[in-house]
Image: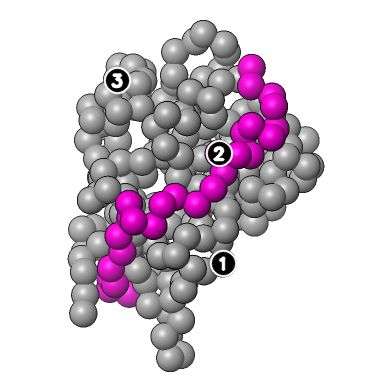
């Protein structure tokens, strides 16, 4: 699964790598070391065929458009790749509303003795990457629009397997256009992209339990520990 991640990369670098208009992005994007469910995350989407990629802030925890309330949002921070095309909560978003959720590292916990030890995972030496995401629109009882998202997960690679039986899908750059294309509706072709990222292109190390508290949002969260 994926329950915490980081985004410390400057916005100028993200705009170039993920090909979105820098002026369209919020100016208050600051380094974040402990992004948690029900917080906002930075994503990139393409609303219409031929339109430019759009940076957007989304609530992390998908609320489908037909939901009566937002009580199930926390349970929908992740969507399993093997059921994403058929599960009612996700299938419409999978078909029409896919996005890139931007990150440059994420955490996973391993049970050691009676405690859970956090580990930090990076791709290609800490470069920014994109989780495969889905998004949706929902109106609360007062009519306020809420745009939310979820991160798709798959079976783990060799690096993640000792820690968890799921891992977030990290897309390769050449897959971005296919994943974002709003006219792409061939489920089989999309599902083929939802595989584990190569373990030999990732690295991990132990970090302090300081990250366990979601209020902590400093470089200390990713400081390696013995």
Which mark, residue 165? 1
| Mark 3 vs mark 1: in front | 1
Per the model, the C-alpha gap separating discs 3 and 2 is: 27 Å
Q: Determine the secondary structure under disc 2.
A: loop
Q: Of the two numbered discs 1 and 2 on the same chain, state the one appearing first in sequence.
A: 1
Q: Is residue 199 magenta?
A: yes
Look at 64% across and 21% down and name the residue there. Answer: 184
Residue 212 pos. (x, y %): 38, 70
- Quadrant the C terminus occupies: bottom left
- Give the image quarter of residue 106: bottom left
Pointer 2 residue = 193
Q: Residues within 10 Å of mark 1 (few under 14, many from 20)?
A: few
Q: Residue at x 72, y 48 (%)?
A: 83
* Nearest to the observer: residue 17 or residue 146: 17
From the viewer's side, name the closer residue of 38 and 197.
197
Label 3 crowd bin: few (<14), some (14–19), many (20+), radius 10 Å: some
Asked where in the image residue 141 lies, by quadrant, the reply is top right
Disc 2: CA contacts within 10 A as few (<14), some (14-19) or many (>=20): some
Q: Magenta segment, which residues?
A: 183-211
Q: Secondary structure at mark 3?
A: helix
Cβ atoms under marks 3 and 1 closer than 8 Å: no
Note whether 62 is above or below 159 in the view shown: above
- The label shown at residue 22 is 3
Which x, y percent locates residue 75? 64, 56
Mark-to-mark CA distance, 1 and 2: 19 Å
Among the two numbered marks 3 and 1 on one chain, the one whose residue lies closer to the N terminus: 3
Q: Residue at x 41, y 25 (%)?
A: 55
Q: Secondary structure at mark 1?
A: loop
Residue 80 visible in this rendered orientation of the protein = yes
The answer to whether any part of residue 136 appears in the image is no
Q: Residue 219 at what x, y percent from top left?
A: 20, 58
């Amino acid at each position: 699964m994926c329950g915490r991640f980081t985004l410390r990369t400057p916005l100028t670098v993200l705009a170039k790598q993920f090909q979105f208009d820098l002026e369209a992005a919020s100016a208050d994007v600051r380094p974040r070391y402990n992004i948690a469910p029900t917080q906002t995350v930075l994503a990139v989407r393409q609303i219409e065929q031929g339109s430019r990629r759009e940076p957007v802030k989304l609530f992390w925890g998908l609320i489908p458009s037909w939901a009566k309330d937002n009580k199930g949002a926390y349970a929908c921070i992740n969507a399993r790749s093997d059921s994403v095309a058929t599960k009612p909560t996700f299938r419409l978003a999978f078909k029409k509303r896919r996005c890139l959720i931007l990150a440059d590292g994420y955490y996973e916990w391993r049970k050691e003795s009676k405690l859970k030890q956090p580990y930090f995972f990076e791709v290609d030496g800490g470069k920014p990457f994109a989780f495969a995401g889905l998004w949706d629109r929902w109106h609360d009882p007062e009519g306020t629009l809420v745009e939310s998202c979820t991160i798709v997960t798959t079976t783990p690679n060799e690096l993640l397997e000792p820690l968890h039986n799921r891992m977030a899908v990290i897309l390769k750059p050449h897959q971005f256009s296919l994943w974002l294309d709003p006219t792409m509706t061939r489920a089989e072709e999309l599902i083929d992209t939802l595989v584990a990222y190569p373990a030999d292109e990732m690295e991990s190390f132990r970090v302090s339990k300081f990250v366990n508290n979601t209020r902590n949002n400093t470089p200390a969260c990713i400081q390696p520990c013995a």
